[in-house]
Amino acid sequence: MHPDREAMAKTIRALLRRGVSPEDAEDFVQSAYLRLSEQQAKGKVQAPSGFLYRTAMNLSIDDGRRKRRWSGSDRPVEDLPIADPAPLPDAVLEGRKRLEKLEAGFSALDERTRAIVKAQKLEMLSVAEIARREGLSVSAVEKRLRKGMLFLMTWMEE
């Protein structure tokens, strides 16, 4: 048993009262009718008119949520401001200056301390791995790391 035309018209009127456009209201009722047909074929619908009404209302609610979620602006995409993720030129220049200063600080370190600091900070090696590679004790590597990092921090603050 399918809902009669009056039940479909009643559902459309209810959707229109909720502010749904006439085209969308008809689409929601049509979609609800298709779902009703599928469920009736499975024998799962007791009240076809109620099922049609409730399904159409749910479809309109879902559509409203979807539109609110995706409608950031009514303006065309071409008119929206575009944020450039690249840093500003002065920030790039400042970064380059800091990098040059850091390179000069590394050059000022003795060769072994420079190798130890780079191994830990750039190559991400553990103190034990550096000690094995350099042929030093763990304690000696730790001391050189402290000395080198303290020197670089002071160098960068000057």
Image: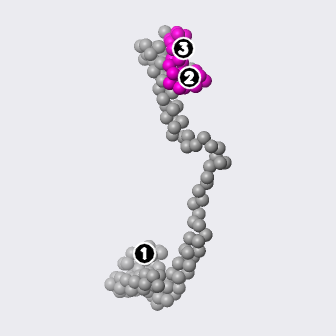
**Horizontal and vertical percent position of residue 26:** 58, 21
Label 3 vs label 2: CA separation? 10 Å
Task: For marks 1 and 3, give the CA distance.
Answer: 74 Å
Q: Is residue 1 magenta?
A: no
Of labels 1 and 3, the one closer to you: 3
Q: Secondary structure at mark 2?
A: helix
Amino acid residing under circle 2 = Ala
Check disc 1 and report the residue beneath it.
125
- Residue 9: which disc? 3
The three-letter code of the residue at mark 1 reads Leu
What element does badge 1 sit on? Answer: loop
Q: Which residues are magenta?
A: 3-26
Depth-wise, is mark 1 or mark 2 nearer the camera? 2
Q: Earlier in the sequence, mark 1 or mark 3?
A: 3
Residue 25 - label: 2
Q: Are marks 1 and 2 in contact (CB under 8 Å)?
A: no
Viewer-proximal residue, 8 or 140? Answer: 8
Q: Quadrant of residue 96?
A: bottom right
First in residue order: circle 3 vs circle 2: 3
Q: Quadrant of residue 24?
A: top right
Crowdedness near tag 1: few (<14), some (14–19) or many (≥20) residues, C-alpha within 10 Å: some
Circles 3 and 2 in contact, beta carbons < 8 Å: no
Which is more toward the observer, 142 or 12? 12
Residue 35 in sight from this viewpoint: no
Indicate whether residue 23 is drawn in magenta.
yes
Which corner quadrant of the image does residue 46 belong to? top left
Q: Is residue 150 above or below residue 3?
A: below
Within-10-Å neighbours for mark 3: few <14, some 14–19, many 20+: few
Q: Residue furthest right?
A: 78
